[in-house]
Amino acid sequence: MVEIKTPEQIAKMREAGLVVAAIHEATRAAAVPGATTKDLDDVARKVIADHGAKSNFLGYGGFPATICTSVNDIVVHGIPDQETVLKDGDIISIDAGAIVDGWHGDAAFTAFVGTGHDPELYELSRVTEESMWAGIAAVRKGHRLIDISKAIEGYIRRQPRPASGRYGIIEDYGGHGIGSQMHMDPHLLNYVSRKRGKGPRLGPGFCIAIEPMVSLGTAKTHVLSDDWTVKTDDGTWSSHWEHSVALTEEGPLVLTAVDGGKAKLAELGVETAPDPLA
């Protein structure tokens, strides 16, 4: 069952989303050569504490950290530790969340560590991020869940192919409802599966975390022995981008973007809802 939020609840989710945005800003600045992924987790913990919020990652299903730090061929759910030292040329996807008064925010981004990256990696991240925004632009009254999946996959498939021949849209992980819990119905695929049907119709109060994960090769992944870390089967590097989005009577609001998604969605011809905290 899909949880429908009131405007007041969406305002609380916006508060949580801005905490996540602050985590992103701080960890992006800290993701430099020589830093450990544990260093980044420490940064995130301080931001959460400074905002009087709570972590929704720490302890979730036994997860031992505040953020996920997924380096290079790790797709998602990488566990921060003192042994993983970032190197010049690495890429890292940082997934972060926060809770304010029982309401959740969740978002992820891919960062480039140092310099010397293959242009194909920049393009991978760009394609992944832009496919997320295409999905966000499809969050409209009257649309169905499948319209978000179509927008994400359609954008990726229209891009020039990488040297590997095809972008791999990760199959085993996707977006999700969000609100009074971090992961809720409905599950959002980043590609179209006719077996899943069209999904629920979108309307005011519908909130969803949209998070494409794309590799330079396979769509297949495996989980390491820690029961969390997810890697690509063929060792190709991957990118992960995510925002939490609320649909209101006035349109979509990107809860985890500082400007509510206004600038980016304007490029796509979509007007965002007013920020309830403005």
Image (cartoon, helix red, strand yellow):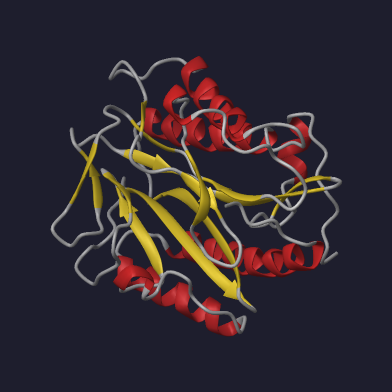
**Residue 261 screen position, x and y as percent:** 72, 47
State the residue at coordinates (25%, 62%): 85
In front here: 77 or 33? 77
Residue occupying the point 58% across, 83% down: 50
What x and y, as percent, mark residue 269? 79, 29
Q: Mark yes or no: residue 35 visible.
A: no
Depth order, front residue of 37/226: 226
Measured along the vertical axis of the image, is residue 137 above or below residue 257?
Answer: above
Q: Nearer the viewer, residue 164 or 185?
A: 185
Residue at 32% x, 65% y: name it.
Answer: 37
Q: Which quarter of the picture shows residue 145?
A: top right
Total numbered circles: 0
- At 38% from the left and 60% from the top, the residue drawn is 32
Residue lying at the far front of the rendered structure = 1
Q: Is residue 79 left or right of residue 240?
A: left
Q: Quadrant for the C terminus, please.
A: bottom right
Residue 122: x percent and y percent? Answer: 44, 34
166 relative to 95, above or below: above
Where is residue 178, by image quadrant? bottom right
Up/down of 114 relative to 35, above or below = above
